[in-house]
């Protein structure tokens, strides 16, 4: 009898190995801004940028898109148009960080070594953390401006709303652009007035936070906005389940007590968010899961050739584009010093900014630092609602972003 042929198992292919002086993980606002600034100092050939996406988004416009002010397509550009000249674009996702050995592995099987690593992969939207949310998003009255895919559905639901209960949520986790949960609510309420359905509409802001805003200077104004608009606030209420067929939202009460069920006709959800899983399971993570960074120098607390910024970081400040712009300047100065063996000269003080739209044509420009001390740019009281600041958000800030910030000029 002929013996059966024994087929040897094929050994997995060895990872493709390469090395770059500086590797930047993430091609969003943070990664592109740092890459543009480093190119001016080091030249493009010293840089590699790891980013799988082909499209780049200016996400602050998503509030206005969800409110029917702008077309969402104005928020996007091809990623390739923003990669600094001469830099290597690794169009792949990181699968594993190996900071002890000075390299990372990509999902496509590349092994990329580095002298310095900048980690800024953004934030993860944990839709699945709320049972019923993912499957109901975009239908059954459930929408969110945190999803580009569902921006048009958000505006359609607001535009076609004919009365009932409109619920807007805010989770117990850190989120990118935390003020946006209120902004879309204020725009929706404004639109309900314009279309004559406000008198038969109950607007509820169900927030896991203890108050309307963490900085009293701006909270005072926002409390007046909520009162003027007759919005019902339910603080320390954290969304834990969506029951789409019954049109019910279930909230845990963070101050104790039984869960609260609120029926809705419109439910706008700000999803819980966290650091990307690849960061959480890596040696780069703090116990919280976020990148373990020095909050002033942006250098990693255990790996001196690793720096980080943006939404994945552990920095105790609001996660906004303005924060990224300030952080990028500090990080680049400190990384350049580190490669020369010098002490790190720059310090980030937690500066962030949140342009809080309070209605069509109205905006409060909140700016503050780690200590929640206002750090206002203009020589007038920015805690007041102003049309000029609304126009700045609508026209000025997108121009600043596309023409200056991501080009390394601001």
Image (spheres, rainbow, N blue to C red):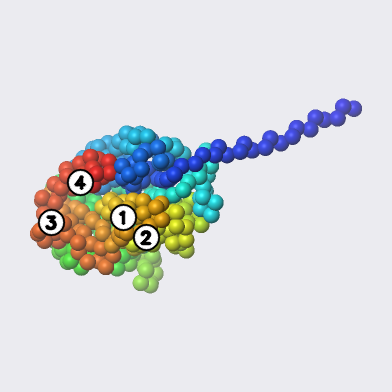
Q: Is residue 154 visible?
A: no
Checking the image for residue 397, the label placed there is 4
The residue nearer to you, when weighing 222 against 259, is 222
Whether tag 4 and tag 3 are in contact, CB under 8 A, the answer is no
Q: CA distance from mark 4 to mark 2?
A: 34 Å
Give the mark, 4 or 1, whose residue is nearer the N terminus. 1
Give the mark, 4 or 3, whose residue is nearer the N terminus. 3
Whether tag 3 and tag 1 are in contact, CB under 8 A, the answer is no
The residue nearer to you, when weighing 317 against 42, is 42
Checking the image for residue 176, the label placed there is none
Instruction: From this view, report whether residue 302 is shown above or below residue 126.
Output: below
Q: Residue at x 18, y 48 (%)?
A: 393
Seen as rendered, the residue at the extreme top is 2
Front tag of 4 and 3: 3
Tell me the residue that label 1 is attached to: 330
Q: CA distance from mark 2 to mark 1?
A: 13 Å
Front tag of 2 and 3: 2
Tell me the residue that label 2 is attached to: 343
Q: Residue at x 17, y 44 (%)?
A: 396
Front tag of 4 and 1: 1
Instruction: Provide residue 165's location: percent of width, then percent of height.
Output: 26, 55
Crowd tier of the residue under label 1, counting other residues whose Cα lies within 10 Å: few below 14, some 14–19, many 20 or above: many
Q: Is residue 26 visible?
A: yes
Q: CA distance from mark 4 to mark 1?
A: 21 Å
Task: Assign a secondary structure to mark 4.
Answer: helix
């Amino acid at each position: 009898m002929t013996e059966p042929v024994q087929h040897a198992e094929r050994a997995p292919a060895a990872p493709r190995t390469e090395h770059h002086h500086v590797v930047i993980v993430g091609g969003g606002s943070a990664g592109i801004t740092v890459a543009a600034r480093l190119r001016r100092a080091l030249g493009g050939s010293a840089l590699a940028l790891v980013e799988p996406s082909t499209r780049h988004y200016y996400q602050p416009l998503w509030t206005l898109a969800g409110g029917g002010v702008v077309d969402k397509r104005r928020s996007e550009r091809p990623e390739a148009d923003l990669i600094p000249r001469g830099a290597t674009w690794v169009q792949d996702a990181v699968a594993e960080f190996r900071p002890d050995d000075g390299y990372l592995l990509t999902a496509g099987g590349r092994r990329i070594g580095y002298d310095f690593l900048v980690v800024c992969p953004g934030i993860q939207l944990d839709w699945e953390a709320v049972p019923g949310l993912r499957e109901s998003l975009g239908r059954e009255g459930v929408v969110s401006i945190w999803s580009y895919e569902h921006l048009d559905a958000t505006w359609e639901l607001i535009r076609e709303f004919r009365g009932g209960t409109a619920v807007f949520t805010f989770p117990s986790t850190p989120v990118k652009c935390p003020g946006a949960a209120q902004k879309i609510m204020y725009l929706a309420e404004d639109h309900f007035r314009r279309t004559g359905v406000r008198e038969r509409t109950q607007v509820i802001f169900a927030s896991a936070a203890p108050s309307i805003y963490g900085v009293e200077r701006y909270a005072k104004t926002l409390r007046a906005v909520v009162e003027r608009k007759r919005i019902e606030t339910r603080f320390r209420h954290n969304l834990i389940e969506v029951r789409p067929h019954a049109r019910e939202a279930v909230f845990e009460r963070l101050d104790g007590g039984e869960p609260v069920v609120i029926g809705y006709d419109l439910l706008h959800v700000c999803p819980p968010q966290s650091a990307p899983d690849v960061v959480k399971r890596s040696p780069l993570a703090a116990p919280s899961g976020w990148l373990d960074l020095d909050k002033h120098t942006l250098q990693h607390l255990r790996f001196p050739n690793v720096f980080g910024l943006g939404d994945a970081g552990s920095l105790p400040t609001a996660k906004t584009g303005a924060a990224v712009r300030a952080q990028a300047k500090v990080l680049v100065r400190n990384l350049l010093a580190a490669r020369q063996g010098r002490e790190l000269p720059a310090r980030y003080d937690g500066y962030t900014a949140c342009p809080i739209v309070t209605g069509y044509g109205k905006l409060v420009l909140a700016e503050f630092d780690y200590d929640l001390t206002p750090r206002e740019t203009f020589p007038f009281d920015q805690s007041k609602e102003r049309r000029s600041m609304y126009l700045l958000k609508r026209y000025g800030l997108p121009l600043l972003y596309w023409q200056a910030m991501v080009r390394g000029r601001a």
